[in-house]
Image (cartoon, rainbow, N blue to C red):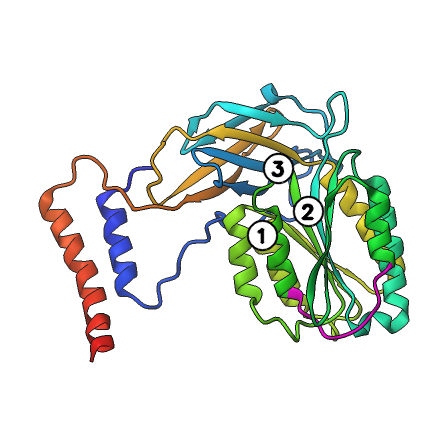
């Protein structure tokens, strides 16, 4: 992506104006379930990561006109572009080929004191057991538990019995460090490859996080291109539903609320099906330089009328486009200096 003179001038003005807002580095509002037009196949991008730049990893779903998931599309059914140019796809995984494709998941689970109410902890145990049964074979699962403390209860494992044992040993006690637990899970998944997701359950508002908050959790998830599916158990009065929804939608996932244990089980089963329907691909960016730009990425299925779009932010310095005049660059530098120097003078004063 080359920056035009007008584009860089607007960037400089954004530096000068305190109220200017940064663009969402995931490229706008997430798609919501059921948003496709009747009779149209829809691609929904759920994650994009530049951790292995110049290789870019993308996760996405394909929904058929009836709302169910297309599971066996092939690489040749998709067109993938960056900045409007076709890119070479190096790796491609469909949910169903000759065998089910495993998924890497972190279960973030609440065992604070309030989980004793209405036997919520018992409902969690049953819901996770059902989730594990429906997850694709070979999937790797880790468990992060939280109350007044945050603890990795189980590292990544394919042993589902071990995961069940860990969940069954949970006892309700203490306060709620929800955001600290989500950030811990994101750290665990940062170096993992392929299909990845976090399922984060809480039955109350965060009251005890020491290292993180809502904004920090969103920023951490965007940094690694990770969807965080949030689950609220209980009434809207008990949980911060708007915050849970914001965390999910800002990371291209979804927020689910369960009034009771029966609903919670159905939600976990639905999420297992959804995670099993996710595609993943890796392509190599045509521009090899980490230049501090947003790279628009589009994926279109042969049967879709429009492409799904996201944008991947590549950290680094903004590189001037060829042909800029020295006068324009000098003016740009002066604008930035006008914005920065007064604040430096105030600090020294």
Looking at the rendering, which quadrant does residue 172 occupy? Answer: bottom right
Tell me what residue is drawn at x 18 percent, y 59 percent. Answer: 335
Residue 165, labelled with which disc? none
Queried whether the magenta region covers residue 170, the answer comes back as: yes
Residue 17 at least partly seen: yes
Of pointers 1 and 3, the one earlier in the residue sequence: 3
Label 1 sits on residue: 187
Does residue 95 show up magenta in the picture?
A: no
**Residue wearing tag 3:** 60
Q: Label 3 to label 2, Cα distance in Å?
A: 13 Å
Q: Secondary structure at mark 2?
A: loop
> With respect to residue 55, does 320 lie above or below?
below
Q: Which residues are magenta?
A: 169-178
- The residue drawn where x is 69% and y is 38% is 38
C-alpha distance separating marks 1 and 3:
22 Å
Marks 3 and 2: which is nearer the front? 3
How far apart are the two marked residues, 2 and 1, measured between alpha carbons?
Answer: 28 Å
- Residue 204 x %, y %: 73, 71
Q: Is residue 261 left or right of residue 13?
A: right
Q: Which residue is mark 2?
A: 33
**Residue 16 appears left or right of 302:** left
Q: Main secondary structure of the magenta part?
A: loop
Secondary element at tag 1? helix
- In the rendered image, the vertical position of residue 207 relative to residue 78, given as above or below: below
- Extreme residue in the bottom direction: 349
| Residue 240 locus on image (x, y percent) | 68, 70
């Amino acid at each position: 992506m080359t920056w035009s003179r007008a584009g860089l001038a607007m960037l400089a003005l954004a530096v000068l104006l305190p109220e200017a807002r940064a663009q969402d580095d995931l490229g706008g509002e997430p798609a919501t379930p059921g948003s496709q037009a009747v009779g149209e196949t829809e691609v929904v991008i759920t994650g994009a990561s530049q951790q292995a730049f110049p290789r870019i990893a993308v996760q996405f779903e394909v929904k058929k006109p009836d709302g169910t998931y297309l599971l066996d599309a092939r690489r040749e059914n998709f067109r993938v572009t960056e900045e409007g140019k076709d890119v070479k796809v190096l790796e491609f995984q469909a949910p169903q080929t000759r065998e089910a494709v495993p998924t890497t998941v972190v279960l973030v689970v609440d065992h604070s004191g309030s989980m004793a109410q209405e036997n919520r902890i018992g409902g969690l145990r049953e819901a996770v057991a059902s989730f594990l049964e429906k997850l694709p074979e070979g999937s790797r699962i880790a468990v992060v538990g939280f109350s007044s403390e945050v603890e990795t209860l189980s590292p990544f494992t394919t042993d589902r019995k071990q995961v069940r044992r860990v969940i069954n040993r949970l006892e309700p006690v203490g306060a709620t460090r929800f955001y600290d637990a989500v950030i811990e899970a994101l750290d665990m998944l940062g170096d993992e490859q392929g299909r990845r997701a976090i399922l984060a359950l809480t039955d109350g508002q965060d009251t005890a996080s020491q290292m993180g908050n809502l904004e920090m959790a969103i920023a951490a998830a965007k940094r690694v291109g990770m969807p965080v599916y949030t689950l609220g158990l209980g009434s809207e009065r008990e949980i911060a539903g708007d915050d849970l929804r914001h965390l999910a939608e800002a990371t291209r996932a979804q927020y689910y609320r369960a009034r009771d244990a029966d609903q919670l089980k159905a939600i976990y089963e639905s999420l297992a099906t959804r995670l099993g329907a996710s595609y993943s691909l890796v392509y190599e960016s045509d521009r090899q330089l980490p230049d501090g730009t947003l790279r628009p990425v589009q994926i279109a299925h042969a049967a879709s009328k429009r492409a799904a779009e996201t944008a991947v932010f590549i950290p680094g310095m903004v590189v001037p486009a060829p042909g800029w005049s020295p006068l324009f660059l000098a003016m740009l530098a002066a604008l930035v200096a006008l914005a920065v120097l007064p604040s430096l003078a105030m600090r020294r004063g």
